[in-house]
Amino acid sequence: MNKLFNSEVTSPNNPKWENAISRKTPLYTRKNDIRSAFERDYTRILHCNAYRRLKHKTQVFFSPKNDHICTRIEHVNHVESISYTIANYLGLNTELTKAIASSHDLGHSPFGHAGEAILSNLSQRDLGNSFWHEKNGLDFVDYIELLEDSQRYKQNLNLTYAVRDGIISHCGEIDENGIKPRQEFIDLSDYKYPNQFSPYTWEACVVKVSDKISYIGRDIEDAITLGILDNHLQELYKLLNYDSPDKKINNTILINYLVSDLSRNSSIEKGLCFSDEAFNLMNKIKKFNYEHIYRSDRLKPSMSYFSLVLTEIYETLKRTFDGKNTLVQLEKLSLYCPTLANNFSSFLSNYSNLENREELKLKNKIIFNLENEYDFYQSILYYISGMTDNFAIDVYNEIIGF
């Protein structure tokens, strides 16, 4: 093991430590708890519903019949594995990378990046700001996801600053080589767009680069399995410098190459960086993927369908806004869309200033005023973004059915 970054590890000896483990409010303690702050974050993430739903959310390819095609939860597991290997080799805090990696995509909408773009268009139109999954992920762990305490009261996840920072700072769409953390302890609400700031810790930087390593090879592997790259295999072999079409394009080999290269070439002075050869290859693969996978004609029909589904759900709920009478309008909607209306009403009750909060055993932060139009539209976006692919489709079919 290299352990080159031992002096930078997020630990009690690091000047950033107190900021890194800080929470918005103190977390309850147990006399017999043997976990660290970041281990507690990790288990809180595993127990939240947003994490559980990732197994039914699109990574790149929607609703594959082949069980071996990557879904969002598998991607998260890849990022967790890759970031652990890198952090362990460099001497960084693997508990922190594990917590960040497991939570980094909690804010993803149904239907992957296509769904994210659809919700962003709606958000820009009605709220004047973009929807992006990194910010949505931070909002989810700060405000939306709830866990029951020992008295069965529902409370916010209340994660550490370092993990929350890793979520909003993880954007894997990076083209720079030599990633380093920032020194400033900023208010994370200062983020206005993806990749605006560097992460606060080296561990979050590791997750950021692991996110990119994890998807470029796996997306190729899946695209080959689904026949999407049948007409582009020769170009791919040439890009990878393969001398024989009999040589298997193997994601594990590509990951090993990139992880090993990054680990050997990184330093505190240079940051997390690849060799020029590996960095150029990774960017070429990313360009290939965009041209022949993400913009493939095979994916275009599904994109139109996703827009139809998510937009109709949004507009159906939007029409129920009626100030003080909004809940009454939702009750009327439940007569022909019971799944949508009742589930959304239940969702709203967790975050609104209603009189029955004690009855519902709620101790989380109130974030919606149901009489406020902006708040209501924001609540719809949060609600839709949490849906799984198939639940969104089921709700859409309920809307159009008679």
Image (cartoon, rainbow, N blue to C red):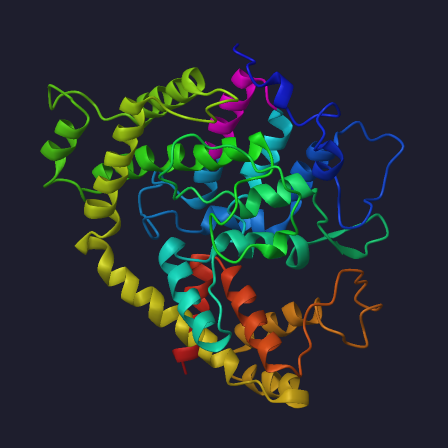
**275 w.r.t. 153: above or below:** above
Q: Which region is colored magenta? A: 78-92
The image shows residue 23 at horizontal and vertical percentages of 75, 45
Residue 43: x, y in percent?
Answer: 68, 38
Residue 164 forms part of the magenta stretch: no
* Residue 269: image location, x then y, percent: 50, 22
Does residue 402 lie above or below 283 as drawn?
Answer: below
- Is 88 a magenta residue? yes
The residue sitting at 51% across, 51% down in the picture is: 134
The answer to whether residue 79 shows anywhere in this view is yes
Judging depth in this view, the residue of 183 and 287 nearest the camera is 183
The reply, left or right, for residue 83 in relation to residue 249 is right
Q: Looking at the image, which is closer to me, 374 or 217?
A: 374
The residue at 54%/71% (across/down) is: 380
Horizontal side of residue 209 vs 33, given as left or right: left
Note whether 176 is above or below 188 in the view shown. Answer: above
| Residue 140 in view of the camera | no
- Quadrant assignment, res 392: bottom left
Front residue of 157/190: it is 190
Left or right: 390, with 155 as reference point: left
Q: Position of residue 186 (x, y in %)?
A: 65, 48
